[in-house]
Image (cartoon, rainbow, N blue to C red):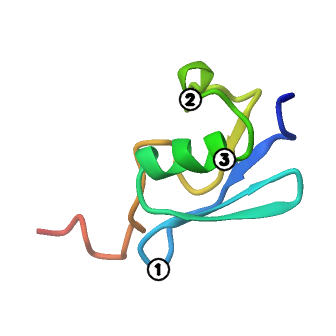
Amino acid sequence: MGVPARVIVYPPAGGGRRVRAGGEDLGVARSPVELVEFLRRAGLDPDDVRLDDPALIEWRGGGPEVWTPDLPGSQDV
């Protein structure tokens, strides 16, 4: 199967990040492992997926290391 259209991973909200590919909603991933599973179901080989590949994934609101929202005051400890 061919490579799907560019993947968009939206900012963290509600415990995860919404994922879309080719205009299709793939769901809400709660971790990089879940994201890779969504991409596998969309036809990508998990062994070929690099989460830091900007040609494949457009990260909005933080990169692959960000899975919770940055709440105001959360850094003020």
Q: Quadrant of residue 1?
A: top right
Rendered-image quadrant of the C terminus: bottom left
Q: Is residue 68 left or right of residue 28?
A: left
Element type where label 3 sits in the image: helix
* Image disc number at residue 46: 2
* Image disc number at residue 48: none
Number of marks in the rendered image: 3
Q: Which residue is mark 1?
A: 14
Q: Is residue 13 above or below residue 33?
A: below
Task: Give the distance between the C-alpha atoms of the residues marked 1 and 2, in whole angstroms.
Answer: 26 Å
Q: Residues within 10 Å of mark 3 (few under 14, many from 20)?
A: few
Kindly identify the amino acid type of the residue bearing the numbered disc 1.
Gly
Residue 69, x across and y down, in percent: 42, 68
Element type where label 1 sits in the image: loop
Q: Which of disc 1 and disc 3 is earlier in sequence?
A: 1
Name the residue: 58% across, 57% down.
61
* Image disc number at residue 41: 3
Name the residue: 40% across, 43% down.
65
Q: Is residue 53 left or right of residue 73?
A: right
Residues under numbered marks 1 and 2 in contact, where contact means CB atoms less than 8 Å apart:
no
Residue 67, x across and y down, in percent: 41, 58
Residue 45, x across and y down, in percent: 64, 27
Extreme residue toward the left, this view: 77
Kindly identify the amino acid type of the residue bearing the numbered disc 3.
Arg
Name the residue: 47% across, 67% down.
16
Task: Give the distance between the C-alpha atoms of the residues marked 2 and 3, in whole angstroms.
Answer: 10 Å
Q: Is residue 72 left or right of residue 64?
A: left
